[in-house]
Each structure stands twice: as C-alpha cells, then as structure tokens.
Image: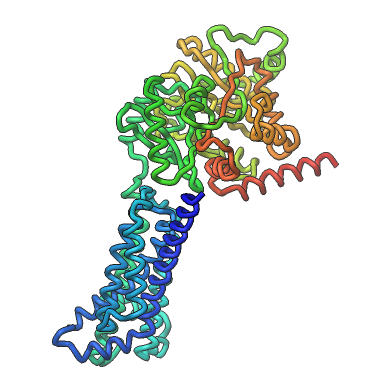
Amino acid sequence: MKKISAESIKNSIINAAVLLTLMLGIENILYEYYNRIYVISYISKYFYFFNPETLVLHRTISVITGFVLIFTSYKLYKRMRMAWVISICMLSVSMLMHILNFHSVLNPAITVEFIVINILCFNYKNFEKASDPINLRNSIFLGITIIFIIIVNTCFAAYELNIRLLSLNGFNYAVLRTLRMLFLIDFSTLGHLSARKLIFVKTEIAINWTGVLATLFFILKPLVYQPFVTAFDKEKVRKLLNKYGENSLSYITIEDDKKYYFGNNVEGAIAYTTVSGVAVCAGDPVCSDENMPLLITEFITYCKQNNFAICFCHTLEKHIPLYTYLGFGKTKCGEEAMFDLETYTLTGGKAAKIRNAINHASALGITISEYKPLVKRDKLIEQQISEVSDEWLKNKNSSELSFMLGTISLNNPMDRRYFAAYDNKTEMLGFIVFSPFAGGKGYLADITRRRNNAPIGVMEKITIEAFNKMKLEGVKWGTLGLAPLVNVADDGGVAGKLFQFVYEKLNSFYGFKGLYHYKKKYSPTVWENRYIVYYPKIFTPKIAYSIIKAQNPKGVGDFLLVQLKSFLGAKKEEV
C-alpha cells in the first residue's frame, strides 16, 4: 500500500513539473511580447557587448523555446523519451535567456526552471516510451497554427513600429510590400528606421522565417520519419505474401493506407495503421508459423514503447492459441465463406438460387471476360470500370471504406485479377476484383461493383465463371470474404454478446443478415471462423472506435450518419 502511495505521489510531482513546463513555454512567449521594447532599450546600451545580430538571435531563441516547450508538453506528460530530452534542452536554454535578461539568478522564473529540470532529471527512468511519429493531419494542423502565429506576430510588429500599411496605395499593394519586407528583407516601405527599430524588424523577420521553416519541418517530418510506403517496401511485402500470405486479407497489406513493421530478427511483416493510440492490424502477421511468436512479441514491444494498444482484425482460428498464449483477448467477428474449387459445383438444392440467377443473366446475352491490364491496357475498359465504380459509390451515398478492403488499383494491379460482365451491346454492367492469397492458391472476391440497372444474376455469373476459370488453372480456394457478426454468440464473452445484439437488433443499419444470406446461397464448401484479437486482453470502446475509424477515413460520425440515412430510407419505403 505504501509503495502504491509513493508511486502516486511521484507521478503527481512529475505531472506538476510537466504543467510548469507548459506554463514556462507560455511565459517565454508572453514575456518577449510584453518586454520586447524594454529589453531592446536596455540591451541597446551595451552594443559593444550585445551587437544587433546577438539581440536578434536572443529574442528568436526565447520565442522558439516557448513554442517548443508548449508543443512537447503533451508528449512529456505521456512519458516520451524524446520529449524529455527536448524539454531538458529547452528549459536549460530558457534559463540561460532569463539569466541574460535579468542579470541575476534570483528570479522566480529561473528558480522554477531549475526545479523543473531537477525533477525531470531525477525521474529520467519514468520517461521510457519511444516517440511515435506525428501523423500528417496533426502536422498540417500544427503548420497552420504556426502560420497563424506568424501573422499575429507581424501585426504586433506593425503596431509597435507605427506602420500604417493601409495608408499605402491600396490593400493589395500593402500586402505585396509586406511580403517583400518579410521574405525579401526589403525595408524601403518602412522609411527611416532607428538602430533600435531596425533590430526589432530583423528580429521579426527571423521569427517569421523560423515559423516558416518549422511549418515545413512539421509537415515533412512524417514523410521523413515515417515515409509513405515505397515501391521497395511493397515489393518486399509482396514477396513475403507469396511465401506466407495464407490469410485471405493478406494482399491488402500492399495498399497505400498501411504502415509496415518488419521483423528485426525474423523474416516477416505486420501491416497496420494507428488510430487513437491503437495499432489496428489487417489480418495476421505475414510470416512463417514458426516465426510468428517472435514477430508478434517484437511488435508488442514496439507498441508498448509507443504507448499503443494492439488489435489484429480478421485473424485465422488456427492462430488463436498463439495469440492467447501471448496475452491477447479474442472475440469472434464473423465467418468467411470458403470454396474448395476442386470439388465445388452448383448441383443440388442449396445452390438453386444461384443457378437460376446465372441462367437469367445468360438468357439476356450477358457475357463474362477477364481484363488483364498487365498484358495490354485498354482505356475504354478502364473508363467503364471507373464509371461503374462511381455509380455504385454514388448510390451508396457514403465515403469509400478502406483498410480492410482492397482498391481497384488499375495503375498498379500487381497480382490482382479483373472480371467484368457485359451486355450484348458491350456495355459493362459490373465487375469483381479478385486479390490472391496463399501464394496464388486462393483468390478473394475483394471489390464487387455493379450498375444500378444491372439485371439479376450479373454478379453471380461473374463470380462462378471466375471461380471456374481459376479452377482450371489449378487454384485451390475461392472466397467471398467475411460475413460480419455471424454466430458471434458462440464465442461467449461480453464483446460476443454485444456483437450478437448488434447483429440481431441493428441489422437495419448495415444489413448483416442480408450479406450473410447472399453469401450463403452460393453454398460455400465451409464457413471458417474469423476473430478480432486485442492486447491488452480487454475489448474497450477505444478499440471498437479505432476499427471503425480505420475502415472509414471520415470517421465514426460519417458511418453513423450513412447508416441512419439508410435506416430512415428503409422505414420510409415500408410506409
């Protein structure tokens, strides 16, 4: 009990030091604005010691230090190691600047900085987490913030120097001359300036340029620290997929919305994205079964260093004992319709609906053909694919889902296969993009889209004829993908009961049952269980949110709005 109490007190002291760091950052900025003229007047008496260039550098460093302390305080609160290093450095610089300003060490600000530095140094072991890269969206927001600060800073400069920009020949001319002053260092519009005011203007220019460079740095930082997936990375993952990608979702790991964790000591990769502090992973790790324990263990260590929870989506049942052994919780998320193409046929009563739909499409003269963009590009076919896709998305009246789904990717098809249906007038009625798994021994019907006026049987005919062609080529497995939330109550647990409630009571919002029955009428060879596994082993609302957010870039609000519109539309039709 005493140990817990002592630890609580220790954390409270550290958090107080973090709060003081934030306040010191604000103080640095406000002090410079409030005392800038006083400081310039005071130090101008000592130009033999503080020359103008030194004064410009002095003010610039103080303001920059304030901004850095503000921006790193949150990461410091999250106990990030790099934030600790930066804060120690900036607080030391800030303390030196205050000593130069006050010509004394007996000052409240200096005393507080000294105390904070000692608290942080004494508790350095508490700051162990590796800094995760700032994502692009936050970086752009930060850049906009800095640009806004630059504008405000320039307005203060104009006010303090009594510059009446609007008295020039028109507002546009004033803006032009101001930009020339800030970026071309052209002081001609300011008239005669005293040495003190000239120093002040140079300082403003230095601060503005610092802001511009900082904006570029923060926006480009994610591209340097965590670059976009390169062609080399994709090719590396593609080779791993051909060797180890047994999960039907494996191929989506080469999509552009994925980040990669490559094994340090084993051959393998994990495709993931980060949402709200959760590393959401697509499918299982791409590696051999014997290397999977070590690869997952490495990834757990990496995520702990970055303060990430972990969630693997659509995992195979065969790997559940391993995930459980490594400390993951699990929840069944649905069942996948699998077809053994060597034995699959449409005979029997279970597939009667599919036979009837295909016969109807065939009677209308609908034909199926495979488009091979790697063999020969056809602009007309690709234009029709784009038109069908746009029409389908418009009819959905929602943003396109991602992360757990692939893309059409005609510009970089790699190993994808494209099958399309045409009427007797050669108009494309629908298409399916198949992505490979198990080294090309299986194919997933990943992207399925059709025109609004496409007759019954179009998609069924594409699916079956594609499967038949693959069968002749020696492909072992075909799959229609996951039927979400099917029989999830079998798994038990709170999450399973919640998913079952969603499946039974909120079907109008998504159509889980309709999707299941559509796939069921094909009479799959087997329904295989699929799971969500998560670390730590408690399924939290944050994990649920991260899964939805990863799949819908516009967020949970867009998802709920779309489902509500669909629900209200269905109710209106019933009336």
40 or 105: nearer the viewer: 105
Q: Is residue 552 above or below residue 297?
A: below
| Residue 437 in the image, given as x and y percentages of width and height | 46, 22
Q: Residue at x 32, y 75 (%)?
A: 110
Residue 418 visible in the current orientation: no
515 or 312: nearer the viewer: 312
563 or 447: nearer the viewer: 563
Q: Residue at x 38, y 31 (%)?
A: 269
| Residue 432 in the image, given as x and y percentages of width and height | 55, 27
On the rendered structure, is 386 left or right of 63?
Answer: right
Disc count in the image?
0
Classify residue 410 by image quadrant.
Answer: top left
| Residue 482 in the image, given as x and y percentages of width and height | 59, 27
On the rendered structure, is 49 left or right of 324?
Answer: left
Which quarter of the figure is the C terminus placed in?
top right
Classify residue 271 by image quadrant.
Answer: top left
Q: Is residue 361 above or below residue 454?
A: above
Colour scheme in the image? Answer: rainbow
Q: Residue at x 35, y 56 (%)?
A: 123
Residue 108 visible in the current orientation: yes
Residue located farthest toward the front when viewing the structure as drawn: 2
Residue located farthest toward the left when viewing the structure as drawn: 48
Q: Is residue 512 above or below residue 339?
A: below
Q: Residue at x 68, y 19 (%)?
A: 521
| Residue 81 in the image, given as x and y percentages of width and height | 34, 52
